[in-house]
Image (spheres, rainbow, N blue to C red):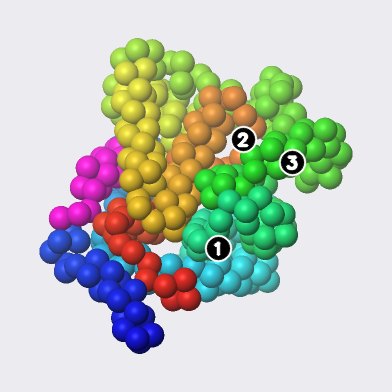
Amino acid sequence: MIEHASLSYRRPFRERSFGLARKLMRVNWLFVLCVCALAGVGYAALYSAAGGSPQPYAQSQLIRFCGALVLMICIAMVDIRFIAKLSWPAWIFGILLLIAVMKFGHVGLGAKRWMTVGGVEVQPSELMKLFLAMALGHYFKRATPEQTGNLLFVMPAILAILVPMGLILKEPNLGTAVITGTIGATVMLGAGVRWWWFALVVVVIAVSAPVIYHHLHAYQKARIDIFLNPGSDPLGAGYNIIQSKIALGSGGFFGQGYLHGTQNQLNFLPEKQTDFVFTIVAEEFGFFGSVAVLGLLMMIVALAYYTALSCSHVYGRLVALGIATNFFLYCFVNLSMVMGLIPVGGVPLPLISYGGSALTAVMLGFGVLMSIHVHRDVEFAEPGDF
């Protein structure tokens, strides 16, 4: 009798499985199309950044994207219940990578954020954001309202956020650490953790701001000072943001024309292929082109949040929420930085900025997101299985 009941309980696990053809049909192809369109914008911007040449940015970025797109579709075909099994091992792997980068990573722009693995440059902090969302989704997938209101139950999740944040801060990489913490907080809020706990943390941080500022690295203090007064060093630390604003304004409504942006083509824009790539779009395509790109970014964000809302299982909802929030924060922080609304923080614009680590991390996250969408109504058979 007990064995029969057990088999009956497991039946949904098997009945909800389906073949490759049906999985491909269930992929959100509108989302995939928007992702490809955004990568196309990135190719055009990087082609212009090189003065009208596919080298050295656009061609290599296109090759990376094509490989990452295949990887995304392959991950989408993997059963989300199998991915759920990997949540905590992935988190542990991410922590090990963050520790390894402190010892074996190479220094770039004054920070140890990258390391070479098998000839491929990896930025572990970018991967950690995805792994954190997966781990927290796994932890809270069967949590009750009573448990999410119990600080002792929530404490392991808080530690799961603080440990990678601490390691990322050691690189140092304040911007990514803040984004990582925000993703963790968003997933916890989605799981039902009391909102006023987070409000209290925000108040404490705000009150402690002068103390926190005192303990920042010199370059981090300089970024804040320049943000408050860019004109204090117009040819030094304030140069980037001043030139960025000039490029944004010079595009007008219709832009100066593709490959005809003066700030871009005359090399007044520093880091134009990475952090400040949006200035190329704004200068050459103007206000209307910028709005079109912003609309494309927001469409991807909206479709990602739709996947979270339409998923029937808690694990998928929470992980999709974390992935969608990560992409939104990428866009919000980069665009705000370029417009001078927040201090410059070295956060790329996803799928448009040049660079392999961020692109790969984003596409891995999108692969998990599509797996959630494809398997949005599967059932997790038993509490002990995952």
How many marks overall?
A: 3
Where is residue 336 shown, x and y percent of the image? 54, 29
Q: Which residue is mark 2?
A: 344
Q: Is residue 76 left or right of residue 273?
A: left
Q: Which mark is residue 31?
A: none
Task: Give percent across and percent down for residue 95.
Answer: 61, 68
The amino acid type of the residue labelled 3 equals Val
At a point 33% along the width and 64% down the height, the residue shown is 379
Q: Which residues are magenta?
A: 25-46
Q: Position of residue 228 (x, y in %)?
A: 71, 23
Q: Is residue 122 left or right of residue 210?
A: left
| Pair 3/2: label in front | 3
Whole-percent x, y for residue 321 in the image: 46, 47
Q: Is residue 280 left or right of residue 155?
A: left
**Mark 3 nearby-residue class (10 Å; few <14, some 14–19, many ≥20):** few
Residues marked 3 and 2 touching at CB (< 8 Å):
no
Would you name the residue on which mark 1 appears? 139
**What's the distance in space between the residues labelled 1 and 2, CA to CA?**
34 Å
